[in-house]
Amino acid sequence: MESVNKDIEALLFYGKTELNLSPEGRAFARNRLLELLQTEPSEEEPSIEEPSIEKTDIDAVLSRLTSYAVQNGIVEEEVADKFPDLLMNIVMPSQDDAAHTYSRLHRDGGRAAAEKYFSYLAKASRYVKKPKPGTVGWTVVGRNGDFTVVVPSEDREGSESGYYPKCQYCLENIGFCGLPGQPAQYAKRVLPFDLDGETWYFYYRQKQLVADEFIAAAGKHRPSGEGRIAAALADLAEKVPAGFAGTTFEPKEHDYLFGAKRVLPIFTRPIKRVVFDGDYKVSILDWNFSVLRIEGYIKKDLVRVASKVMKYWRNYSEDNIVYPLFHCTETSYIADIALLKKGKANVLFDQPDYYGAFGVFVLPHKMKENILAMVAALGEEKIDFQSIHDSPKTGKYLEWIIQIAASHGAGLPKEKALDAIVSLIGKTCILAANDFSVDDKELERIFKESSEQN
């Protein structure tokens, strides 16, 4: 009992130092924790100022408290992964307090200060999960800028629907215990944003592929395709001064926008050529994929031009792909719009996804197992191509293995085989950029013809 009380005090101390938990809040939270963990308070006066507690690893504290709860029948082992979020929810600001603090900081210190607070809260509360060890990535040198290829340690959860909440993007997820197999939502906090006259709810993703990755979900459970997307994206970009706002146009059960910190390789690329320079400027970016940049000082001009370009290209062919990326500087609004055509599917993907078009190719986490299986096959002194063809891990990459074996022979050392596979992955990404992009003349035509439409 002494050890669990010490961990309770350590959690309360963390709440004080990292989550602005007041003395009154700590007293309230202590009682809730004692009740939840079914333990009695220590006879000694609580001392949460000890240096040893200050240095305590909060993740270790949460792990020990969770183990205690499992061992004492307080929580079932099958759902024990949700228990740390339940504990953290007790010592962090409530939904209303978090939203009010954001509003106060926004009013007194500006958007950047408010955004910094909310981002830190999501991480300090452990709502944003630390990535599991094992994520690997490397740089691919492209013709017009470098790509990043990432193989995450785990894939993100898919969307699940139910009676309550209807989907993972609904407001009712705040404080929800979480669907089976999904992370708990106890520590979830959202911000109500007005985007194009409609309420959307902003929050950070629990599992992030890019720094400070977030979601802005429509306030109502409605499908995508309703409303003025460009206007909503421009409004959202204003509210995340260090980030960008984007979306995709495939049908969604619940409409949402997304974005992250401006760390994608596209942000390092210069302008290749200016197409139009008037009340706003339209340029072609010097990038591997075909991207138009629209920049203006007046938001409604940017929204109008971007809307026309996106609508024109989507209506031109049902196979065309449009990926908008909106961001702001202190003086202007910017929309980088990837305008892609139908290309040839490859062994990695049928078409580049949103992040791939702007410089980060995220492959499925199982790709790591596939790569290791290919390395093992290439290490054999006599390569069994039939077994490679029949294997679910290597079958689709048979041509790669044949190509590498023809160039380097069999019995390859692991390092050499891995280098050859990584090189082919990079070449596949570069070929996709060429295959799915349109040329500069086509980009210029798209802008000119779209601008002539009402």
Image (cartoon, rainbow, N blue to C red):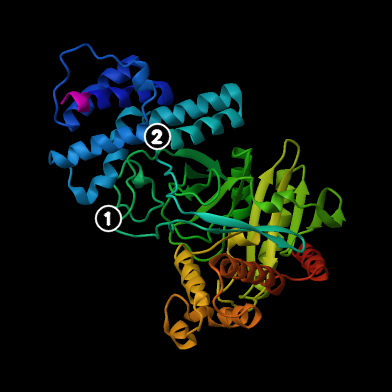
Q: Residue at x 54, y 76 (%)?
A: 411
Q: Quadrant of the N terminus?
A: top left
Q: Is residue 74 visible?
A: no
Give above or below for 384 relative to 429. below
Query: Where 95 sits versus 399, above or below?
Result: above
Which stretch did the figure color magenta?
A: 1-5
Q: Is residue 95 above or below residue 420?
A: above
Q: Which residue is mark 2?
A: 125
Q: Residue at x 51, y 80 (%)?
A: 381
Residue 112 in picture, x, y percent from top left: 61, 31
- Residue 150, x across and y down, in percent: 55, 58
**Based on the displayed image, in which of its 4 quarters is residue 181 positioned?**
bottom left
Measure how far apart labels 2 and 1 are at the Cα level. Answer: 21 Å
Q: Nearer the viewer, residue 386 or 194?
A: 386
- Residue 446 belongs to magenta span: no
- Predominant secondary structure, magenta span: helix
Q: Which residue is mark 1?
A: 180
Callout 2 amino acid: Ser
Q: Is residue 173 visible?
A: yes
